[in-house]
């Protein structure tokens, strides 16, 4: 039986709190890695997501409160990351769930806030669970999803949404 390194899943509220190089290693692995078949996706890059926050486009005041997830090993290496936002509306998602929100509210629930794993204002299909290709830990994606689900109660969020994801994500 192989011994796995101890890891932790962190929530950050500004992408500037993350290491850009490590985020990008998960988001867009370099050519030559064992996962070099992935195409470069500028929309999950640190630079793009950070620009959305720095421009005040994707911040709490606009309804896109960053709650990015980082899966980090004991040495501080990122094993996986997930861009996630606490949303109090559905604007800028290009997913028209207003009917669902209305039905949920009529049934006595509160649809907002919700947790949204996506790229703000970008209806482009891509990966949303971003894994470090040099990690051999097969459970990283599951731990990221488990952490997101665990946050639902903390934030009194109705649901977790992953939008515009690739089929193999």
Image (tube, rainbow, N blue to C red):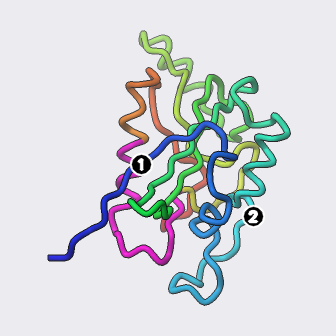
Q: Which of the pair 52/165 is nearer the observer?
A: 52
Q: Which residue is mark 1?
A: 9
Task: Please tell me whether residue 139 is drawn above or below residue 59 in the rendered image.
Answer: below
x, y percent for residue 10: 46, 45
Q: Residues within 10 Å of mark 2 (few under 14, many from 20)?
A: some
Q: Residues within 10 Å of mark 1 (few under 14, many from 20)?
A: some
Q: State the extent of the magenta-drawn residues as a range.
A: 129-147
* Distance CA(mark 1)–CA(mark 2): 24 Å
Q: Which of the pair 147/39 is nearer the observer?
A: 147
In the rendered structure, find residue 85 and report the number of the disc placed on it.
Answer: none
Q: In the image, is 102 to the left or to the right of 141?
A: right
Task: Please tell me whether residue 46 is drawn above or below residue 1 in the rendered image.
Answer: above
Instruction: Say what secondary structure mark 1 lies in.
Output: strand
Instruction: Say what secondary structure mark 2 lies in.
Output: helix
Q: Residue at x 47, y 78 (%)?
A: 134
x, y percent for residue 58: 74, 37
Furthest-left residue in this view: 1
Quarter holding the N terminus is bottom left
Q: Which residue is mark 2?
A: 42
């Amino acid at each position: 039986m192989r011994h796995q390194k101890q890891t932790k899943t962190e929530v950050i509220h500004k992408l500037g709190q993350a290491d850009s190089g490590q985020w990008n290693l998960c988001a867009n692995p370099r050519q030559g890695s064992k996962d070099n078949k992935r195409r470069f996706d500028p929309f999950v890059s640190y630079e793009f997501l950070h620009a959305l926050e720095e421009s005040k486009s994707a911040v709490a005041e606009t309804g896109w409160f960053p709650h990015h997830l980082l899966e980090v090993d004991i040495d501080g290496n990122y094993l996986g990351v997930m861009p996630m936002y606490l949303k109090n509306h559905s604007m800028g998602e290009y997913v028209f769930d207003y009917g669902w929100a209305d039905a949920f509210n009529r049934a006595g629930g509160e649809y907002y806030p919700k947790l949204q794993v996506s790229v703000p204002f970008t209806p482009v299909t891509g990966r949303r669970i971003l894994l470090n290709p040099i990690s051999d830990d097969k459970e990283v994606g599951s731990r990221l999803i488990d952490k997101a689900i665990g946050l639902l109660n903390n934030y009194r969020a109705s649901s977790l949404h992953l939008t515009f994801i690739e089929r193999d994500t």
